[in-house]
Image (cartoon, rainbow, N blue to C red):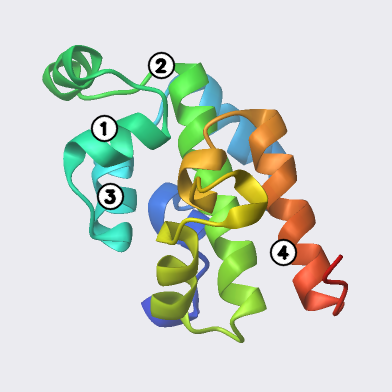
C-alpha cells in the first residue's frame, strides 16, 4: 500500500484513484463527505471563503453542507475536478506539492490576472488550466 505522501490529491481526498472511474463516479453521485472540501482547503492553505469561491459554493451553502455533512453531486464533482488539476500541477512540478499549490494560487497574465485555482471553477476554465500545464510540460510557451 502506498504511503500517504505517495498518494495523489484525489486519492487522499476521496480515497479512490482516478483510474477507478466507476468507484469515483459512485462517490460523486453519492456526494462526498464535507470533510473532502476541508481536506482540499487544508492542502491549499486558504480560508474557507476562498475555497468556496474556487468551487463556486457560497458561504451560506457551505454552512448548510457542513451541517448536513455531505456535498451534492455537482459540488463533489467540482472538488474532484480541482483535486485532479492540482495533481496535474504537482506532476508538472516534479512531485513538489507545495510548489504546485503556489503555482495554482499565483495570478497568471494568460488568465487576465486570475489564478489557476480560481480559473478551475468551471469545466471550461479547468480545460484552460490543463492546457497551460500541458504547454508548460511540453515547452510550448506561445
Residue nearest the observer in this picture, 18 or 116: 116
Residue 90, located in which quarter of the rendered image? bottom right
Marks 1 and 4 close (CB-CB < 8 Å): no
Asked whether disc 2 touches disc 1, contact meaning CB atoms under 8 Å apart, the reply is: no
Q: Is residue 20 left or right of residue 45?
A: right
**Earlier sequence position, callout 1 versus callout 4:** 1
Residue bearing the label numbered 1? 34
Report the Cα–Cα distance between label 2 and label 3.
Answer: 17 Å
Q: Is residue 20 visible?
A: no
Q: CA distance from mark 4 to mark 3?
A: 21 Å
Measured in 3D between alpha carbons, the distance from the residue under mark 2 to the one under mark 1, in whole angstroms, is 10 Å
Above or below — where is 43 with respect to 119?
below
Pointer 4 residue:
133
- Residue 68 percent coordinates (x, y): 18, 16
Circle 3 sits in a helix, a strand or a loop, which is it?
Answer: helix
Residue 56 located left or right of residue 51: right
Query: Considering depth in this image, is 136 or 16 the residue closer to the camera?
Result: 136
Which circle marks residue 41 in the picture? Answer: 3
The tag on residue 72 is: 2
Q: Residue at x 31, y 61 (%)?
A: 43
Does 64 sit above or below residue 25?
above
Reading the chain from its start, which is encountered first: label 2 or label 1? 1
Q: CA distance from mark 1 to mark 3?
A: 11 Å
Amino acid at each position: 500500500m502506498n504511503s500517504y505522501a505517495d498518494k495523489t490529491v484525489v486519492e487522499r481526498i476521496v480515497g479512490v484513484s482516478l483510474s477507478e472511474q466507476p468507484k469515483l463516479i459512485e462517490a460523486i453521485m453519492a456526494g462526498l463527505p464535507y470533510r473532502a472540501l476541508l481536506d482540499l482547503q487544508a492542502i491549499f492553505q486558504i480560508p474557507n471563503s476562498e475555497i468556496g469561491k474556487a468551487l463556486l459554493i457560497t458561504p451560506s451553502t457551505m454552512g448548510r453542507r457542513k451541517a448536513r455533512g455531505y456535498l451534492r453531486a455537482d459540488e463533489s464533482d467540482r472538488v474532484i475536478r480541482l483535486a485532479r488539476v492540482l495533481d496535474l500541477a504537482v506532476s508538472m512540478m516534479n512531485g513538489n506539492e507545495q510548489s504546485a499549490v503556489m503555482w495554482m494560487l499565483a495570478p497568471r497574465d494568460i488568465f487576465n490576472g486570475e489564478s489557476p485555482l480560481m480559473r478551475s471553477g468551471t469545466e471550461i476554465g479547468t480545460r484552460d488550466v490543463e492546457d497551460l500545464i500541458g504547454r508548460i510540460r511540453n515547452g510550448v510557451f506561445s
